[in-house]
Amino acid sequence: MSKIDRDILKGNGWKMGACFTRSSCPDLVSSMDANHAQNGDFVYIAITHDCAIINPSLEAEPFLEYIVAHPITKLDGNCTHTKNPRKLHIELDFQGLSSPFELNIINRAFLNRNLLLENKPAQDVCLNGLQKASLVRWLANRYMGQALPDQFEKRIDPVRHKLNKLLSKPEANSMLALYIYLNPIEELASDQNYTLTVALIYEDAASNKLIKKNQLENYVNEIQTFFQKTSGIDISGVVALSEKDFTLYQQRRMIRWRSDHHSFKQVMDDVEMIEDP
């Protein structure tokens, strides 16, 4: 079969972000490798672009790419909103409830697209629009990147676990991104200090909620204290901004910093990703 009926695929509900499970699509799951099909609680998310999913030519687009999502007990702020390039924590609408799941970038694979004709996405689990947008950005970030100076990373490495602990606190769950302005953005001698400015970017509603609870100022102070105690870095300031207040001008002049950002000397798979402003 070199052709496939795109109207059937559309009618079945196949598109990027469509979710399926073992119960909704047993034929698809049974064709997977054993490590992806071993757990009945897994949710599978189609990550092939909409146009490719319903392309009528199987020669041009023979496969559906999917990623595995497995349930977790709670979200980790280090991994929400694309802050970590390897893991993404999102909430799926699962059986009427908002449930946390983890996606790992290595848990992707392909299925024969002709199997979609006889299978439909699950009706009891789905991605909402914001979560789908987060997934798309996370996947795209694998192919856009900028590394930080080795000397800066050497100063962060001894205390990185403490930073990650701070970024795993509940106050970070609704943080969209952590941006930094680093001066200079080049290698320094070990006796010279980097100057660092940090911007914590929040969803607008979440920012207002944290402010009302008097939690945001305390959290900002914790982040600032952390950098003040980090050898070789002069922290010029830490600010928390609503996404509405973070301008394109600021975004273009700062670096979106991942929780495990690495330098050029790390292997290429370790180079962290930023969004193209």
Image: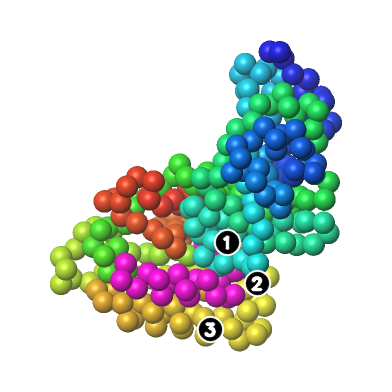
Which quarter of the figure has residue 25? top right
Q: Mark 2 is on which residue type?
A: Ala
The residue identified by callout 3 is 217
Question: Percent x, y for residue 92?
Answer: 72, 56
- Callout in the foreground (1, 2): 1
Report helix, strand or loop for mark 2: helix
Determine whether label 1 and label 2 are within 8 Å by CB.
no
User: Of the residues under marks 1 and 2, which one precedes in the sequence?
Assistant: 1
Q: Which mark is residue 206?
A: 2
Residue placed furthest toward the top? 2
Residue at 79% across, 32% down: 119
In the figure, is residue 108 to the left or right of 158?
right
Numbered mark located on residue 195 in the image: none
- What label sits on residue 80 in the rendered view? 1
Front-most of residues 273 and 161: 161
User: Which residues make up the magenta segment?
Assistant: 157-177
* Residue 232 forms part of the magenta stretch: no
Q: Earlier in the sequence, mark 1 or mark 3?
A: 1
Does residue 183 appear in this view?
no
Q: Nearer the viewer, mark 1 or mark 3?
A: 1
On screen, 100 above or below 6? below
- SS under mark 1: loop
Q: Residues within 10 Å of mark 3 (few under 14, many from 20)?
A: few
Amino acid marked by disc 1: Thr
Q: Is residue 277 left or right of residue 91?
A: left
Question: The residue under label 3 is which amino acid type?
Answer: Glu
Nearest to the observer: residue 101 or residue 256: 101
